[in-house]
């Protein structure tokens, strides 16, 4: 694994896509992910921006992804509970169920060969589209190196 490459592209991508107003994502996580490995192993947070994720809580999220019961269960990231609204070949979208903001919040979760990339956004359909483009751009860069 070329960690230097991953860190470089994360820093560049996150500075352009995560955080301040006007950016497509309010937070993002890059989680080491081996779908064939035992779920009792705590997944390592490779990178994070705009959120302080707890590795133990994220291990529950990784177990959720591995169980592949996306349509019948919800998941948590931090204190927010999400319900999957759309499922695709290598990614899924979810909406936050316990948020007070009128436009709501959502998550895009994309699986690459070595990672789960989680992008969190505020807003509705337009925001979800911008978030998907941002997440897809980073995943494409990882895919160029089979990561």
Image (cartoon, helix red, strand yellow):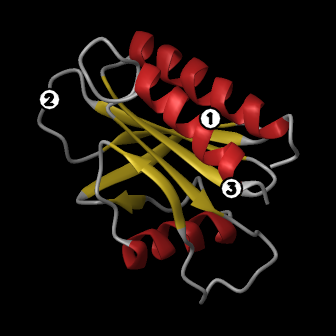
Up/down of 103 relative to 147, above or below: above
Q: Which residue is mark 2?
A: 101
Residue at the image position 53 percent from the left and 28 percent from the top: 12
Q: Which residue is mark 1?
A: 9
Q: Which residue is mark 3?
A: 3
**Mark nearer the N terminus (2 vs 3):** 3
Residue 31, position as x, y percentages in the image: 57, 59
Location of residue 17 (image quadrant): top left
Question: In the rendered view, does 33 fall on the left or right side of 27?
Answer: right
Q: CA distance from mark 1 to mark 2?
A: 32 Å
**Residues tagged 2 and 3 counted as in contact (Cβ below 8 A):** no
Location of residue 66 (image quadrant): bottom right
**Mark nearer the N terminus (1 vs 2):** 1
Residue 114, position as x, y percentages in the image: 76, 58
Mark in front: 2 vs 3: 3
- Quadrant for the N terminus in the image: bottom right
């Amino acid at each position: 694994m070329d960690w230097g490459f991953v860190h470089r592209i994360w820093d560049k991508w996150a500075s352009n896509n995560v955080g301040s107003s006007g950016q497509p994502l309010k937070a993002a996580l890059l989680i080491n992910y081996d779908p064939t490995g035992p779920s009792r192993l705590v997944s390592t947070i490779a990178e994070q921006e705009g959120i302080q994720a707890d590795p133990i809580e994220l291990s529950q999220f990784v177990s959720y992804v591995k169980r592949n019961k996306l349509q019948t269960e919800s998941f948590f990231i931090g204190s927010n509970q999400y319900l999957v609204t759309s499922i695709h070949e290598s990614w899924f979208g979810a909406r936050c169920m316990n948020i007070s903001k009128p436009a709501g919040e959502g998550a895009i979760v994309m699986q690459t060969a070595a990672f789960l990339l989680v992008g969190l956004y505020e807003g509705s359909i337009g925001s979800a589209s911008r978030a998907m483009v941002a997440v897809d751009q980073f995943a494409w860069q990882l895919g160029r190196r089979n990561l």
